[in-house]
Amino acid sequence: MEQGLATIISAAQIGAAIALFNGAFTTFGQAKIVAQAIESMARQPEATDDIRSTMFIGIALAETSGIYGLLVAIIMLFANPLVSIYINFVS
Amino acid sequence: MLDIKNYWVIEIAGVEVWITESIFNTWIIMAILITIAIIARIKLRNFKEIPTGFQNLIEAGVELFDDIVTGAMGNKLSYVAPWFFMVFVFVFSSSLFSAFGLRAPTADFATTFALSMVTFLMMIFMGLRHRKGKFLKSLFEPNFVFFPINLIGELAKPVSLSFRLFGNVLSGTIILTLWYALTPRIFQIGIPAAFHAFFDAVIGFLQTYIFVIISLMYIKEAADG
């Protein structure tokens, strides 16, 4: 019982770490958006305000997948459904 | 940390209603905002054509927000501005609320999901009102085979909208709770102020702005095509 529970919890922790790893790619995409925005701001300084607001929207949309990963990690760590399933299964 | 505390359980017609921490904090924010609104109303009773002082401040705020809405949606649809002004003020003040060490109502998925469901219903309602049959037809574009994909695409909008706000506010809450729980007492003076300034004020404002702007974009997409 204890060993099985320990296995499940450690697997959940590893799963949470893998889920958080997509933050790397999310940040990469956001960096690309900002780099392009700065480039076009330097090319067209008079359009800075429009580019900035569009950039924020783009950043937020790119952030969505990172947030999904974060939520999966949080569920794995704090509200793990597998533990209760296992306890129900054993008892 | 992640548990939302439950204060009271009330029974209404045999149904248990849980008054949780986030509902209670929502009431506090509502009380503060309603008080401010009533004070503003009383102060603006002698409305002047040429604004001065307090009236100037209020008019500047409303005008700024009107400009954002008109810029995002155009003149025809800008009548949704009052609702989104309310959403903006509520979400931003609830982000600031966690700077006082209390739990922000937007760190509860129910709050953000309710707000994004309103956006979803507005999307459907305004699409039907402004485009009528064309809005329903746009679900079957380019072919009727694509109907399930389009439907899932529409249903994913409120989910992603609510998860984005919820995830950002919750991550700030978790990081601050970890800081308060794990560090010795000396580091809890002064240093959390910087965290609160970043996670509550900066991220809170940015996410509020993005929530409103993306809601406006979705509604404009549904209503204008």
Image (cartoon, coloured by chain):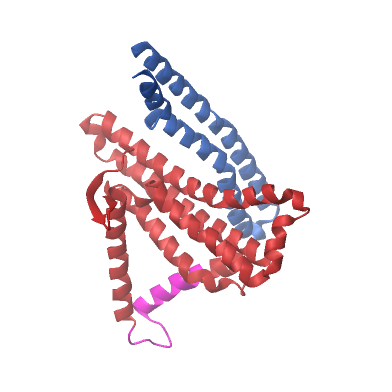
Chain colours: A blue, B red
Q: Quadrant of the C terminus of chain B?
A: bottom right
- Residue A70 lies in the magenta-colored region: no
Residue B41, image quadrant: bottom left
Magenta range: B45-65
Q: Quadrant of the N terminus of chain B?
A: top left
Single out the residue that lies furthest toward the right.
Answer: B143
Q: Position of residue A33 (x, y in %)?
A: 63, 44
Q: Please name the residue shown 57% across and 36% down the image.
A: A27
Magenta span: predominant SS is: helix
Residue B139, image quadrant: bottom right
The answer to which of A40 and B6 lies nearer the viewer is: B6
Taking B58 as reference, is A33 above or below it? above
Q: Position of residue B14 (x, y in %)?
A: 27, 54
Q: Please name the residue shown 48% across and 51% down the image.
A: B207
Res B80 seen here: yes
Q: Please name the residue shown 30% across and 75% down the image.
A: B38
Q: Position of residue B164 (x, y in %)?
A: 50, 46
